[in-house]
Amino acid sequence: MCSAFVLYWSFMPRFESKDINPTQVPPDQRRGRGALSNEVGRFERFSRENFDDGWGVLPDLPSLRTEVRFEKIKKVITANTSPDLSFDRSFNPYRGCEHGCIYCFARPSHGYLGYSAGLDFETKLLARPDAPERLVKALSSKSYTPKTLAIGTNTDPYQPIEKEHKIMRRALEVLAEFKHPVAIVTKGVLVERDIDILSQMARDNLVRVGISITSLDAGLSRRLEPRVPSPQRRLKMIERLAEAGIEVHIFTSPIIPGLTDSEVEKLLQAGSEAGAVGASWALLRLPYEVSGLFQSWLAEHVPERAAKVMSRVREAHGGKDYDAAWGKRMRGEGVYASLIAQRWAVAAKRLGLVTKRDPMRCDLFHVPERKGDQLSLF
């Protein structure tokens, strides 16, 4: 059994067939995945696509499996100066995300690796096993000034491969030892595994966890986020973390116009009842390849709503699929976006959910002594 593909210069015409869609992978091969296609990244010189050369093997190809490769890194903390973000530094144990959320704004980042923002993003993952050791070195620098470290801002630190590689847990152990504040966003149940460390840090106001829930509709959630725990399971995560004394927030993100926007109040209510003390939100973002991937998803899964969803998206972004301007990229603009913001704010206030978070403690930060360190005489 073999497969064939066509490799051609990007300026050549695409192969077309009445029987094969050259941009999509057959459903059986992408079972349990979010994206429908695997077009090459926007920086690549060549394009490739499946091609039936007469042997009829394409329908019988095996399902895509998750591949994990290892990446050595020099710089472990990523700095940002974005004025519409609440943090100035982040840490990512993995690149790519097996959760496969079709709307994920981080998908285009896989293009820098020569991979596709589509199925490659979900199946070709990079783990950074030496990241915790690099974190020790970064925090031990004499020039380092502590401030909240954000984790989960690009890809999920508790995606399924964390169970085997434990990079996130080792990083948390480092942060706990240094007494360094951390803010985590996740959809993964593995966060419950680390309640022992998180609850210890919570006693010193050194951690908060955000649990992201897009919809309470389990069927819709399964299609939007194929390898993410069910909405009810994520509410249970909020409950268990809260019971352990950990500050938990519900992230109602992204709010998808014409698809999940009707659930704003229900999501906040459910999060509050589960034990969340705060909340935040963002409107759907469709940068670069994400727009095409999401529109293909709409056409396959909710064709009757596709036009309405994209019309609302463009209404909130000045007629475009996406506007990357500061202050607009995550909240949108115009009448529709304003109505969403008002509804969300009213519901959050009614439920007593914190929307502006107080800073966590940085005064406890210290560099612990390690074997081989020169001891101070005073």
Image (spheres, helix red, strand yellow):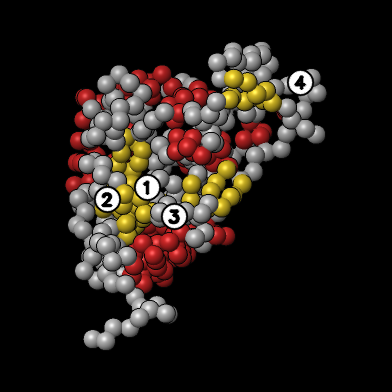
Any mark on residue 53, and which? Answer: 4
Q: Are marks 2 and 4 in contact (CB under 8 Å)?
A: no
N-terminal of the pair, mark 1 or mark 3, is 3
* Mark 2, residue position: 87
* Closer to viewer: mark 2 or mark 3: 3
Looking at the rendering, which quadrant does residue 287 occupy?
top left
Q: Are marks 2 and 1 in contact (CB under 8 Å)?
A: yes
Question: Vertical placement of 94 versus 12: above or below?
Answer: below
* Mark 3, residue position: 74
x and y percentages locating residue 331 in the rendered image: 26, 34
Q: Residues within 10 Å of mark 1 (few under 14, many from 20)?
A: some
N-terminal of the pair, mark 3 or mark 4, is 4
Estimate the spatial distance between the alpha carbons at disc 2 and disc 1, rounded to whole Å: 10 Å
Q: Residues within 10 Å of mark 2 (few under 14, many from 20)?
A: some
* Mark 1, residue position: 153
Given the image, on which type of amino acid does mark 3 rest? Lys
Q: Residues within 10 Å of mark 3 (few under 14, many from 20)?
A: few
Given the image, on which type of amino acid does mark 1 rest? Thr
Secondary structure beneath dot 1 equals loop
x and y percentages locating residue 12 in the rendered image: 59, 14
* Closer to viewer: mark 3 or mark 4: 3
Estimate the spatial distance between the alpha carbons at disc 2 and disc 3, rounded to whole Å: 21 Å
Estimate the spatial distance between the alpha carbons at disc 3 and disc 4, rounded to whole Å: 45 Å
**Is residue 350 or residue 205 the one in the foreground?**
205
Secondary structure beneath dot 4 equals loop
